[in-house]
Amino acid sequence: MQVALQKLSLIDYPGKVACVLFLPGCNFRCPYCQNADLVYNRHSEELVALEEAFMHLGRRQGIITAAVISGGEPLLRETMPELVQSLRKRGVLVKLDTNGAFPDRILAADADFYALDIKTSPDRYDELWQLPPEDAAARILRSIDVVRGSGKPYEFRITCAPGIFGRSEAEAVSALLQPDDAVVLQRCRLDTVLDPDWAAGVNEYTEAELSELLQIIQKNCPQARLRNN
């Protein structure tokens, strides 16, 4: 297996010094995605053998205390439980980032922390993912329930992408949330995206617009916050 390795992160695993393993391949086509090469699983000089990530953890033992598995979509691989265990044997906690496409694989991964990206309202997921609308929505709703009931720390992440996540989508997502959910909204960056034509046709949200979206989410989840990035 090859991965793109970010050797140090202070923000990807809350409260931990972490490294991030980005796995190639994704079943979604979110136009604002910042990892186009990973989505299309293109050859990249940035990819390294998984063993190099393991060696990096060995060299930084006691400094790096967590590893984040991200993508792409990691759960495309049914071998995720083995990867999680291999990382944990190297003395780190493991966080799994997922788009929610594979609810039946989430708990099997047995991560220490889960981050689930909520892209838009469930009835619009078929625009990002080539599944019938009812199938896509059912999988996402199931994943939200699985992550929430996992017994592990978790967060729901929302990228505020113009035209994909607006007021009506925020209302729909807010209705799915519970007061104790950890929810983080983040600004959508329009540079180096999967679909430059899409980016050319939208405008970044203003601070006031982001604040309005946050307030909608906070109606059901008061502790939701906007990440400064």
Image: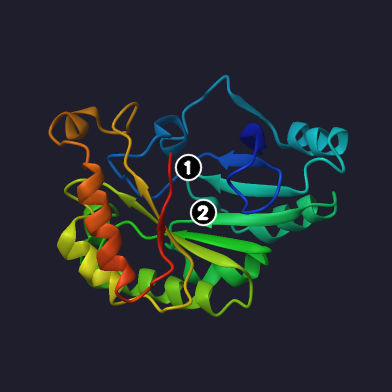
Q: What residue is at 56 percent from the left and 66 percent from the top?
A: 154
Identify the image quadrant of residue 52.
Answer: top right
Residue 1 lies left or right of residue 85; in this view the side is left
- Rendered view: 207 above or below 123: above
List x then y, in percent, for residue 36: 39, 32
Give the residue type at disc 2.
Leu
Query: What is the number of the mark on residue 76?
Result: 2
Examine the rendered structure and indicate whether residue 145 appears above or below residue 32: below
The image shows residue 192 at horizontal and vertical percentages of 34, 26
Q: Quadrant of the N terminus?
A: top right
Q: Which residue is situated farthest in the top direction here?
A: 45
Residue drawn at (61%, 48%) of the image: 69
Q: Name the residue rendered at 77%, 35% in the picture.
A: 51
Q: Disc 1 marks which residue?
A: 25
Left/right placement of residue 61 relative to residue 20 reads right
Q: Where on the picture, by quarter, is residue 55?
A: top right
SS type, badge 1: loop
Q: Are marks 2 and 1 in contact (CB under 8 Å)?
A: yes
Q: Nearer the viewer, residue 102 or 16?
A: 16
